[in-house]
Image: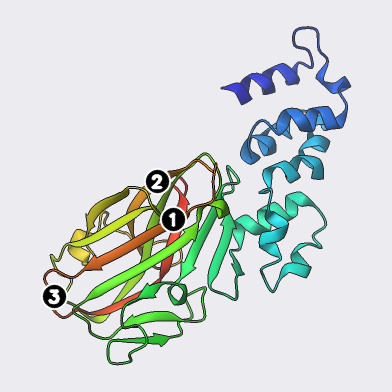
Amino acid sequence: METESIIQATSSKFCAGVDFSALPEGCIAGILAWTSPRDACRMSTVSPEFLRAAESDALWETFLPADYREIIGRSPESSALLDFSSKKELFFRLCNSPLLIDGGKKSFWLDKESGKKFYMIAARELAIIWSETPRYWTWISLPQSRFTEVANLKSVCWFDIKGKMNTCMLSPGTNYAAYLIFQRNDIFYGFEDNPIESSIGVTGGESTKKVIYLDPEHDISPNPTRIDGWYEVELGEFFNEGRESVELEMSIMEVNRLNWKTGLLIEGIEIRPKFCS
């Protein structure tokens, strides 16, 4: 509604005695910075003055994370990315093409509408019990994965996966959720009607726990696959205040029934704002 009001006001070029077309480009960019990337793109159609402001590096610098240079520096693509012709072009590159960082152990990208940060922690960066014992787990390459390796479950009875990330890497003032990203292969069994406990929380604080299922009978929709072809299941959510640097811990565990399980591929754990896809 606020954006609609600005569009209507600026379309008439007059609001409460102010001719918006007479404002300096930097001033208009400052106004647009209080909106969102989506709104800024919409408002670029209002007038030539708004178009110039909506294309300016000054505006799109505000939509990029404050630490975007440091994050990009952790990627082998850093030199090419920092040489983009405009901040707007860089912003949408980071939205449309996840960036591998930290030696390919994490993937980073932005939400196109809000500019909030997304991450995926690769399976290799997770603590998977028995993952280095080929009898239980192996590491394979898949063309549909963004990472060089995914974890292939051969056979275990003790199913235990943990991941962590520092909250300073995430967008402050944001409600996040974590998701296990996985696939099933042709010999999938042992997970049918088998409740698995997931938890998420910061080190030293309370954790939120829930029960999840990985068998297809518990898929939450008729077509639960993601755009990238993987499945996901939510592990829990938390609010990142961003006031301090603490470790966010996530876990997936089934150690009660202790039946043998097999046929699961783990790509990683994705952490994204709750209402972004």
**Residue 194's image quarter?**
bottom left
Tell which tag, 1 or 3, sits nearer the viewer: 1
The total number of labels drawn is 3
Q: How far apart are marks 3 and 2 (CA)?
A: 29 Å
Badge 1 or badge 2: first in the primary sequence: 2
State the residue position of label 2: 238
Asked whether 36 or 241 is in front, the reply is 241
Looking at this view, name the residue that lies furthest to the front: 204
Q: Residue 258 carries which label?
A: 3
Residue 1: x percent and y percent?
56, 22
Check disc 3 and give the amino acid type: Leu
**Residue 180's image quarter?**
bottom left
Q: Distance between the residues labelled 1 and 3?
A: 27 Å
Asked whether 63 or 43 is in front, the reply is 63
**Would you place residue 110 above or below residue 192 in this image?**
above
Q: Which residue is drawn at 21% across and 67% down?
A: 215
Label 2 secondary element: strand
Check disc 2 and give the amino acid type: Phe
Q: Is residue 226 left or right of residue 17?
A: left
Label 1 secondary element: strand
**Alpha-carbon neighbours of circle 3 within 10 Å: few (<14), some, or many (≥20)?**
few
State the residue position of label 1: 248
Q: Dots 1 and 2: beta carbons under 8 Å?
A: yes
Residue 93: x percent and y percent?
67, 58
**Would you place residue 134 above or below residue 166 in this image?**
below
